[in-house]
Image (cartoon, rainbow, N blue to C red):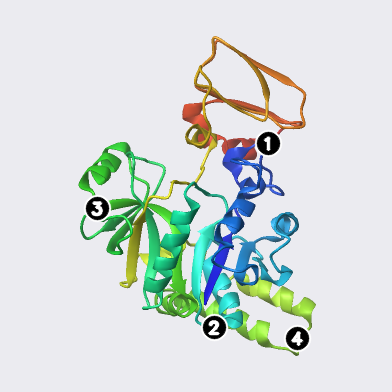
Amino acid sequence: MLTAFIMAGGSGERFWPLSTKEKPKQLLKLVSDKSMIRETVDRILPIIPAERIFIGTNAIQANGIKKELPMIPEENIIIEPSFKDTAAAIGYGALNIDIRYPNSEMIVLASDHLIKNEENFRKRILSGAEEAKKGNIITLGIKPTKPETGYGYIETEAECYIGEASKVIRFWEKPNLERAEKYVESGNYLWNSGMFIFSTKTILESIEKFMPNHWETLEEIKLIMGNKEIDPKEKKVRIEEEFEEFEKISIDFGVMEYAKNIKVIPVDFGWSDVGSYTALDEVFDKNEKGNIVKDARVIDIDSKDNIVVGEKESEKVIAVIGVKDLVVVDTKDSLLICSKKNAQHIKKVIKELKNV
């Protein structure tokens, strides 16, 4: 019994001004004519029916997600009362799924990643599900193509090979360039994709073992959910109150750092987390000057290696003259101009907007 839990509560702040709280990265049509969350769901529909696909999100984005995913039953949209990081999100998702489909194999996916080879992706998911049936926690690790400092890494006990499950030694945080180079050279480090496969029973037992406070909160929520004598409005309020008891911590720190039953499957299906505008360099073809132009009318004069993004419905012409390595994003309400090397800092604009 294969189920999926897609985490879709992120704010996508690195894609301002295209993204907003109501329409974050996963609801944007960044890499195709479909939203990223629709791409994610369509990618797994060949192996998991819509009634067994669950979405974890928040109240602000729930309506947008329902509109984008009409095939997903409304009761499968799991609204998290507050953002408490991935340990709470995955625990709450597993609890809801286990009630409907006890001890099912559960795939945890981000809603806003790019995967180019979808057939290969589904193949690895299915092989991971077989490993998960043995009581293992499976994560998918990306074979590094360069010393990337923007990803966490997974250390394995020996050099790992595509498609072969390997024992995980440790999860490592984002490294500096020198350390990242050593990771890639060693051959036994993988990028941490954040994709997991396990049975609901296994992950809930792991939370009980390594995160007892989290487990107590989940148990209280389960009791509230199952109490038919509580009025639905009161039930909602009480679940919200319990949710606040969760510590804000990732599943990596809460469970994966301690569990001994973790295996990683190295994969190479053309993955990218599309973490910032500069990731579009690896998605779209460039013109003869090295510029990427998306949904915009652009005149480029003596300009190269820029990323220019507009809005399809706009008739505005964007002209770039004598500039290099810039990100230019024009929307109806805002204009962003920044150097590529500072694209990771775009989220700082969100804080400053409060003072404008």
- Amino acid on which disc 3 is placed: Asn
From the image, tell me which residue sits under label 1: 353
Residue 14 sits in which quadrant?
Answer: top right
> Spatial distance from mark 1 to mark 3, Cα to Cα?
43 Å
Q: Under tag 3, what secondary structure?
A: loop
Which mark is first along the chain, 4 or 3? 3
Q: Is residue 226 above or below residue 9?
A: below
- Choose between 262 and 336: the one closer to the eye: 262
Residue at image mark 2: 102
Q: Position of residue 338 (x, y in %)?
A: 56, 25
In the displayed structure image, the side of residue 264 where residue 186 appears, left or right: left
Percent from the top left, x then y, of residue 315? 77, 24
**Front-lying residue, 160 or 97:** 160
Q: What x and y, as percent, mark residue 350?
A: 63, 39
Q: Is residue 311 left or right of residue 142?
A: right
**Which one is closest to the eye, mark 1 or mark 3?**
3
Residue closest to the far bottom: 229
Residue 144 is left or right of residue 326, and the answer is left
For the C terminus, give its image quadrant: top right
Q: How many marks?
A: 4
Q: Are marks 2 and 1 in contact (CB under 8 Å)?
A: no
What number is the disc on residue 188? 3
Q: Earlier in the sequence, mark 2 or mark 4?
A: 2
Q: Are marks 1 and 3 in contact (CB under 8 Å)?
A: no
Which residue is label 4 attached to?
A: 230
In this rendered view, identify the residue nearer to me: 219 or 123.
123
Q: Are the two marked residues, 3 and 2, in contact with CB atoms closer than 8 angstroms?
A: no
Q: State the CA–CA distance, disc 3 to disc 2.
A: 35 Å
Of the two numbered discs 4 and 1 in the rendering, the one whose residue sits closer to the viewer = 4
Instruction: Choose the circle earlier in sequence order: 1 or 3.
Output: 3
